Image (tube, rainbow, N blue to C red):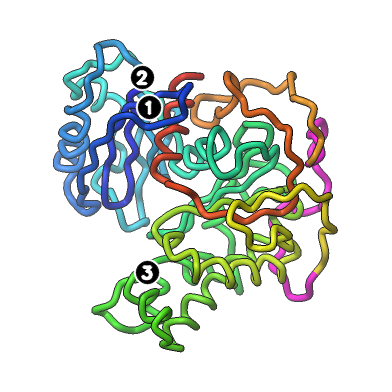
Amino acid sequence: MIPVLEIGGTHVTAALVDLPGRRVVHRTRSPLDPHGDAGDILGDVRRCAAGLPVPPGARWGVAVPGPFDYAKGVALFAGVGKFEALYGVDVRAALLGGLWQRPGDVVFLNDAHAFLAGEWYGGAVRGHRRAVGITLGTGVGSAFLADGLIREDGSGVPPGGRMDLTEVGGRPLEDTVSRRAILVRYGDPAADVRDIADRARAGEERARRVLADALTVLGAALGPCLAAFGATALVVGGSMARSWDLVSPALRGGLASGGWVPDDGGSADGVSDGGESDDGESEGRVPCDGESGDRESGDREPGDDRRRTDAPRSPPATTTGPPHTPAFTTRHTRAVKPAGSAEDAALIGAARAAATA
């Protein structure tokens, strides 16, 4: 069993992962105050982890949002509205010395990377050679994966793989697509996004329009990136994805306007055995950084069932590859899927990072 932590904007989860079985076998979840002082935040993390029956010397995987120095284990949160008190704190040292289980090592990776790695290993996008993951909550998390490895550059990949750095109309994407942006536009200080979703289902036009507009913009920004990257699947997690009945139609419309037309027909599993579809072009779509439509040298075309055997080893924070890679036996087209459990996927992805470090 591999011990892992998943640190979110308002919670921390400690778990044991059975990696060969692709399942979480023990889990403890506790709230976090993202505006607390460093001692309180780290104390809450340690207390959550205290319940895990882990022998000394184990290597732990930790999924945490950025900005963060994942190689050194140092927090760099500044100007993001959470965990600001942790700026410059050596979180690795705090866990190595503060957990009663006395870890032998701690491996950090971005939470969106962990999410997509877990979904590729045994979740919604298993079997896809090229996939993109998006998490929608307090902000927009993103990850691009090819042949089991997270990509932070290349055709279609925004700088650092971060869609939140993409600009739409001269403004950051998160000024339109984030919990904060949606609440500001809706204009009811007593409402949260879940309340807005409930009102949209009940027929309130303003609520429906606020959500639809934000998600259409997201799709239009993503579409060129997915097309240039050669992605055959997009998986969406985070708190907003729980309202998939509202998210899916607007997101799909935006993706199509951005040149990546979903062709899974909105099916439950998003899997098709058809051929590749044309990239398509659409006027007014948002250009993606590095977009050229050409794939990197040595990359396999979607639908090529040959296993990649010459993939270079990546640093622990971005490695999602061997052992136990999924079999690529199904030909996929352009599928859009909700995550089964984004938290489970991130936990499994963190366990894989620890196992392959």
Q: Per the image, is 301 magenta?
A: yes
User: Whole-percent x and y of residue 274?
Assistant: 80, 50
Q: In terms of image quadrants, where is residue 73?
A: top left
Q: In terms of image quadrants, where is residue 201?
A: bottom left
Q: Which residue is mark 2?
A: 1
Viewer-proximal residue among 111 and 266: 266
* Placement of 113 over or under 206, stated as above or below: above
- Neighbor class of circle 1 (other Cα within 10 Å; few <14, some 14-19, many 20+) is many
Q: Determine contact: label 1, label 3, CB under 8 Å.
A: no
Region of the chain picked out in magenta, as a range: 282-302
Image quarter where the N terminus lies is: top left
Give the structural element (helix, strand or loop) at label 3.
helix
Q: Per the image, is 207 magenta?
A: no
Q: Main secondary structure of the magenta part?
A: loop
Q: Residue at (25%, 18%) from the top-left corner?
A: 54
Viewer-proximal residue among 48 and 171: 48
Q: Tell me the amino acid under the disc marked 3.
A: Arg
Q: Tell me the amino acid under the disc marked 1.
A: Val
* Placement of 80 over or under 355, stated as above or below: below
Q: Tell me the amino acid under the disc marked 2.
A: Met
**Label 3 vs label 2: CA separation?**
38 Å
Foreground label between 1 and 3: 1
User: Whole-percent x and y of residue 288?
Assistant: 69, 58
In-image side of 337 versus 16 (left or right): right
Q: Earlier in the sequence, mark 3 or mark 2?
A: 2
- Neighbor class of circle 2 (other Cα within 10 Å; few <14, some 14-19, many 20+) is some
Q: Which residue is mark 1?
A: 17
**Label 1 vs label 3: CA separation?**
33 Å
